[in-house]
Image: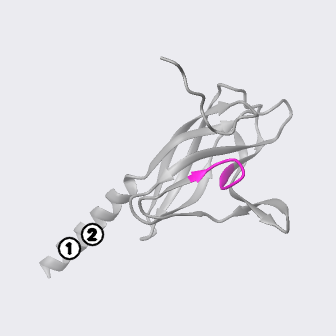
Amino acid sequence: MKMKIVASLFATLVSSATLAQVAVTDPWVRATVPQQKATGAFMQITAPADARLVEARSPVANIVEIHEMVMDKDVMKMRAISGIDLPAGKAVELKPGGYHVMLIDLNAQVKEGDVVPLTVVIEGKDGKRESIELKAAARPLNSSGVMPMHKH
């Protein structure tokens, strides 16, 4: 009986530790023009075990949704989705024209150079959730997400 309890406790600790090691890299938000009420947030997410991006939040917008862009009969369409699967060990890129986070009903213009607070919520296969706090830099409107190389 003790062995089952110890094994169960160990499995819980490993599961929690695995979820805690989700890596989010290069978070950024597209800057807006005055009066623009929505923009996108982008990043790469790598989970060490199968997980799912299930929620995003930001104080800069009244509505935050996870979206995807898909081709439907030669027309690119954007739609809200319930989440994005994060296969173990594979980087999932949220980028313009693909998966992304939509910030809707913005409270103010997002200007190039602003730092936008963003929280992403990752859910493990066991149903446990982890919130990851991010600081996303606002990049120019025409940004594709690729940062220019600097000479050193």
Q: Quadrant of residue 137?
A: top right
Q: Estimate the x, y position of residue 134 in percent, counting from the top left.
A: 53, 40
Q: Estimate the x, y position of residue 36 in percent, counting from the top left.
A: 84, 37
Front-most of residues 20 and 71:
71
Q: Work out whether 35 lies above or below 70.
A: above
Q: Residue at (24%, 69%) from the top-left corner?
A: 9
Point out the residue furthest to the bottom here. 1
The span shown in magenta is 93-101
3 displayed left or right of 59: left
Looking at the picture, the colour scheme in use is one colour
145 displayed left or right of 121: right
Front-most of residues 104 and 77:
77
Q: Residue at (57%, 52%) from the top-left corner?
A: 93
Pointer 1 and pointer 2: residues touching (CB < 8 Å)? yes
Q: CA distance from mark 1 to mark 2?
A: 6 Å
| Residue type of the residue flagged with mark 2 | Ala
Of helix, strand and loop, which one carries label 2? helix
Pointer 1 local density, CA inside 10 Å: few below 14, some 14–19, many at least 20: few
Query: Which residue has dot 2 on it?
Result: 11
The numbered disc on residue 62 is none
Q: Quadrant of residue 130?
A: bottom left
80 displayed left or right of 12: right
Answer whether residue 98 is magenta in the image. Answer: yes
Query: Which residue has dot 1 on it?
Result: 7
